[in-house]
């Protein structure tokens, strides 16, 4: 699986949009971009994933560049409960075993 | 989404004892489950892949005789930390892919192990 690079930390004001970048310059054509988050002392939570088109769900939006070498996770209206470590992971979605390799992630702190 | 549970949520034990952690998929079947370990202020580290009806696959550097994994049914995997020592104190998390959800991974809430 391709490696990813994320900033170690990011602050965001409550109610504002949080834009979390991720670089994955060695991504392969059959690899998807996944985002998970982990609130302190809990198991990770799936947020969203995509291949090359932008994706949106009730939690967030995922913007993938045309060359697929980077992506941005957007939390449209951050709340205090969004404080967590956010992980960007690249893997082959058709891999039925679904093994995930976590990097260091981005610690997001949402402040009042 | 699918639910994965873990038991116990936290355990404290004496050095030299063995501790068993259960991981259950509550509303779906999982032929494969994964076990992770997370030390304070660090990321999750994949330990092993648990396979129903066959031997687990361990990541490099993880002692299979130290961390015994049993996947006896399609909804239960257990991780036994044998002869636990203080350096085994960690947050242990399991996950399982739900094939009905495009193999999206669902994680358990984690088990906090403290070895005295």
Image: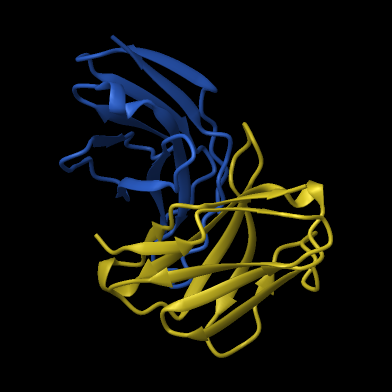
Chain colours: A blue, B yellow
Judging depth in this view, the residue of B51 and B6 nearest the camera is B6
Q: Position of residue B30 (x, y in %)?
A: 41, 77
Nearer the observer, B100 or A49? B100
The residue sitting at 32% across, 73% down in the picture is B99
Residue B35 appears in which quarter of the rendering? Answer: bottom right
Q: Quadrant of residue B101?
A: bottom left
Where residue B110 appears, as percent x and y from the top left, is 50, 52
Compared to A98, does A29 lie above or below? Answer: above
Q: Position of residue B13 (x, y in %)?
A: 71, 55
Residue A39 sits above or below residue B98 on the image: above
| Residue at 57%, 73% in the rendered image | B78
Direction from residue A2 to residue B58 in the image, left or right: right
Residue that extends furthest to the left in the rendered view of this protein: A58
Q: How many marks?
A: 0
Measured along the vertical axis of the image, is residue B2 above or below residue B74? Answer: above
* Nearer-the-camera pick, A13 or A65: A13
Quadrant placement of the N terminus of chain B: bottom left
Q: Going 55% across and 90% down the picture, which residue do you hit?
A: B53
| Residue at image coords 38%, 59% | B106
């Amino acid at each position: 699986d391709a490696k990813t690079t994320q900033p170690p930390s990011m602050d965001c004001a409550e109610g504002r949009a949080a834009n979390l970048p991720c670089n994955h310059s060695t991504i392969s054509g059959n690899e998807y971009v996944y985002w998970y988050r982990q609130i302190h002392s809990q198991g990770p939570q799936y947020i969203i994933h995509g291949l090359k088109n932008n994706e949106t769900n009730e939690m967030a939006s995922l913007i993938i560049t045309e060359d697929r070498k980077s992506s941005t996770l957007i939390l449209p209206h951050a709340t205090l409960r969004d404080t967590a470590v956010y992980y960007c992971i690249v893997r082959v979605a058709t891999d039925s075993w679904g093994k995930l390799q976590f990097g260091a992630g981005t610690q997001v702190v949402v402040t009042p | 989404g699918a639910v994965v549970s873990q038991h116990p949520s936290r355990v404290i034990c004496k050095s030299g004892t063995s501790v068993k952690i259960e991981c259950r998929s509550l509303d779906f079947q999982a032929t494969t489950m994964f076990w992770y370990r997370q030390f304070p202020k660090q990321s999750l580290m994949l330990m092993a892949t648990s396979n129903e009806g066959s031997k687990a696959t361990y990541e490099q550097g993880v002692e299979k005789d130290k961390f015994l994994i049993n996947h006896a049914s399609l909804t239960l995997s257990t991780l036994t930390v044998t002869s636990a020592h203080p350096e085994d104190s960690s947050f242990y998390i399991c996950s399982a892919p739900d094939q009905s959800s495009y193999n999206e991974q669902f994680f358990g809430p984690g088990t906090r192990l403290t070895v005295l």
